[in-house]
Amino acid sequence: MKWRGREQSSNIEDRRGQSGGRMGGLGGSPFGRGGGIRLPTGGGGGSRGGIGSIIGIVVVLGIIWVLTGTNPIDILTNGGGSSTGSGSTASSSGQVPTTGDEAELRDFVGVVVKETEDLWTEVFAQQNETYPAPKVVLFNGGVDTACGAADSSTGPFYCPGDEQVYIDLSFYDQLRDQFGAPGDFAQAYVLAHEIGHHVQNITGVLPEFNERRASMSTEEANAYSVRVELQADCYAGVWANSAGQEDLLDNGDIEEALNAAEQIGDDTLQKRMQGFAVPKTFNHGTSTQRKTWFERGYTSGNPGDCDTFSGNV
């Protein structure tokens, strides 16, 4: 990805070096741990679709159930709250890691987040709405959030309670070494996916799902979570389309993202961990589903084509 020298987001809060919650209360996700939200209802208009087509019903923080034994739906019961801070460099206290590799990765995150902000600001503006960009919090060791305490094993996730994305940058080592998904665009895909959850949250998807889930069985909630996660994948694909229009893609970038989507499919992860898959426990989607929906968003570039709630997925 051609990211060096580009503008970075001012919505990066660097909490690395600070102490934080280490209870691992958020479980684990298909991106390492953590998870997110998503969902639209079709419709369109414009090359990038209308905000009205992004409204749906959603789940937050999908979890690799196999790894943690934690129901990914339970995280939605946590309370609200918010954190503060801005800037693309350091937080108000604590010593931020300053090695060359860490600084470069921080800058990379800042650029990718800024590019997602540009995309979603335009999409919302087409509907005469304002896009409230989320904070993206960098941490190491542990962090306290409105969704509970998390540690490095939690992986990247979006918390609807404070409308912030959290990521320990060491997850990218895990993405490469444990999940077999190297490359900077695989890393960008992870961020774009979590930002997709934010879009779902602010468009009313999450509150609607939270209301419905009270009457759902665990299996039904898992099936719904899959649709939510696949929509986030599709939104990540929409962003990839936008990056292509900005001439930011290198040869092989889309292949890196598709490989990441394949490696974090529920079936692939479960087979890797336990030698077999249990479909009724899937809460993010199979490898084929995740690749299909990312590719759909990338090919279309229209959020309105990310309706994972109509028909089969």
Image (spheres, helix red, strand yellow):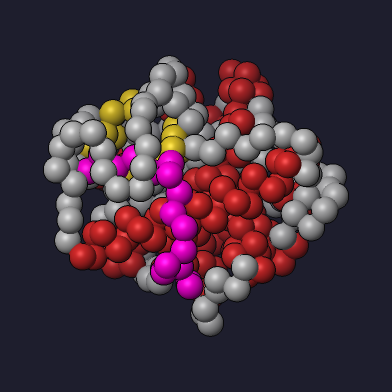
Determine whether 128 is above or below 271 in the image.
Answer: above
Residue occupying the point 22% across, 43% down: 16
Is residue 51 among the parts visible in the rendering? yes
Is residue 259 among the parts visible in the rendering? no
Which image quadrant is residue 254 in? bottom right
Q: Is residue 302 magenta?
A: no
Determine whether 180 is above or below 93 in the image.
Answer: below
Asked whether, in this view, residue 272 is left or right of residue 76, the answer is: left
Dominant secondary structure, magenta: loop
Determine whether 75 is above or below 211 in the image.
Answer: below
Residue 216 x, y percent position in the rendering: 61, 24
Asked whether, in this view, residue 94 is left or right of residue 158, the answer is: left
Residue occupying the point 63% across, 19% down: 211
Asked whether, in this view, residue 185 is left or right of residue 178, the answer is: right
Residue occupying the point 30% across, 48% down: 89
Asked whether, in this view, residue 206 is left or right of residue 157, the answer is: right
Which image quadrant is residue 43 in? top right
* Front-most of residues 140 and 180: 140
* Front-most of residues 263 and 303: 303
Residue 281 x, y percent position in the rendering: 50, 42
Which image quadrant is residue 177 in? bottom left
Residue occupying the point 58% across, 34% down: 132
* Front-most of residues 312 and 30: 30
Residue 49 x, y percent position in the rendering: 78, 50
What stretch of residues is rendered in magenta? 1-16
In this figure, what is the number of numbered marks? 0
